[in-house]
Image (cartoon, rainbow, N blue to C red):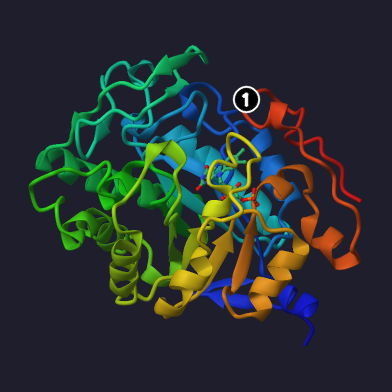
Amino acid sequence: MTSKEVMFTPVNLGSIQLKNRLVMAPLTRMRAIDGEVPNPLTKTYYAQRASAGLIITEATQISPLGMGYPATPGIYSAPQTAAWKEIVEAVHAKGGSIVAQLWHVGRISHSSLHPEQGLPEAPSAIAASGQTYGADWQLHDYETPRAMSTEDIARLLKQFEFAAQNAKTAGFDGIEIHAANGYLLDQFLQDGTNQRTDQYGGSIENRIRLLDEVIETVSTVFPSDQIGVRLSPYGTFNDIEDSDPIALFTTLINKLNGYKLAYVHMIEPRSTSSGGNDQVYEDAPITSELFRAAYQGKFITAGGYDQAMGEQVLEEGLADAVAYGRLYISNPDLVERFKKNAPLSPYNRATFYGGNEAGYTDYPTL
Ligand SMILES: Cc1cc2nc3c(=O)[nH]c(=O)nc-3n(C[C@H](O)[C@H](O)[C@H](O)COP(=O)(O)O)c2cc1C
């Protein structure tokens, strides 16, 4: 089989069946309507991309405090769940598979986005450096978050459970736990943001505890072979860092080997800030080379892939599927284009976040 053929062969990630190995990466588009309900256009947007082997939704917050940017959709209310159900049905009607990415942003937020809940919550009261968008779509300095108590953590686990139940009600093929890109679960994992002295901080075992408990909790709703986990070792987006990524992520992967998860999904740090710019960090470590061998289950890689690089990583056995982000924004029929070696449409960064049809549902197919 040539490397090109591998990309178009089916693969099962746990019990999620993919008709090919192209995955639509999770992409925040900030177009939710009132109540953080997915936009009616979102159904069209995902259905247009249903030829992907798997669609991972944009990150969806599990609670109001989990929200970090204006107009991102949630999965904690009945209207949100009803809208997701229509989206899932539209993707299934076109033969696609779709999982919901469950998200809590932690300190990467602003209190104007959740005025009733107040300050963002995080493992430790350490502000991220830089600025972020508030509810007014203007930039504000990051606030110093409130360090979560053990009661807050117990509540968080309930919220993950409830969000997973809603994802099940909506008919998703599974869920992906967002533990990447410097958001809440990543903030617990990495010691630059986690300086707790309780059972959730300090040693690597303690910093892994929250993600482990989240997986345990959502496993009561979905079988573990319908649950994926997204990680971003060596990523620097959102001011995240760890003093020993090899030790941290190797220990974590060994822990994840104990679950029969659908997959682990890793973002290559060469494109750590691709949500904000197109900079490529050429000399960043290659995490599929560092960590894939340690993981015994299925592995998705993402980050700065074109077709040739995707084929190569599959052929080398460093991944079972490749997720494409920016290329999927502007190429709804990316699978067909790759099959035909057809030219790709360029994306327009100005319409990534917010707005309506333009740059969302109006990119042409071949
Ligand atoms: C507009 C945009 C929004 C993104 N939103 C998310 C998100 O919601 N969740 C997530 O895990 N990653 C998100 N990412 C990261 C992508 O999933 C992907 O890892 C990154 O774009 C690198 O892949 P690419 O080089 O194929 O674009 C986003 C990236 C972009 C460009």
Query: Residue 134 lies in what quarter of the image?
Result: top left
Horizontal side of 170 relative to 314 (left or right) equals: left
Number of numbered discs visible in the structure rendering:
1
Q: Which of 182 and 82 is in front in this view?
A: 182
In the depicted structure, whether residue 134 falls above or below residue 221: above
Query: Residue 209 lies in what quarter of the image?
Result: bottom left
Horizontal side of 39 relative to 63 (left or right) equals: right
Image region (quadrant) for ligand 1: top right
Residue at position x 18%, y 63% from top? Answer: 205
Q: Which of 253 and 174 is in front in this view?
A: 253
- Residue 321, given in percent of the width and then of the height, sits at 61, 69
Query: Residue 307 lies in what quarter of the image?
Result: bottom right
Badge 1 density bin: few <14, some 14–19, many ≥20, Cα 10 Å: some
Residue at position x 70%, y 25% from top? Answer: 356
- Residue 80, given in percent of the width and then of the height, sits at 48, 36
Horizontal side of 178 relative to 269 (left or right) equals: left
Which amino acid type corresponds to the residue marked 1 in the rendered image? Gly
Residue at which label 1 appears = 354
Residue at position x 51%, y 40% from top? Answer: 82
- Residue 303, given in percent of the width and then of the height, sits at 60, 54
- Residue 116, can we see it? yes
Q: Which quarter shows the N terminus?
A: bottom right
Residue at position x 44%, y 44% from top? Answer: 236
Secondary element at image label 1: loop
- Residue 111, given in percent of the width and then of the height, sits at 33, 19
Horizontal side of 282 relative to 3 (left or right) equals: left
In the depicted structure, whether residue 217 falls above or below residue 60: below
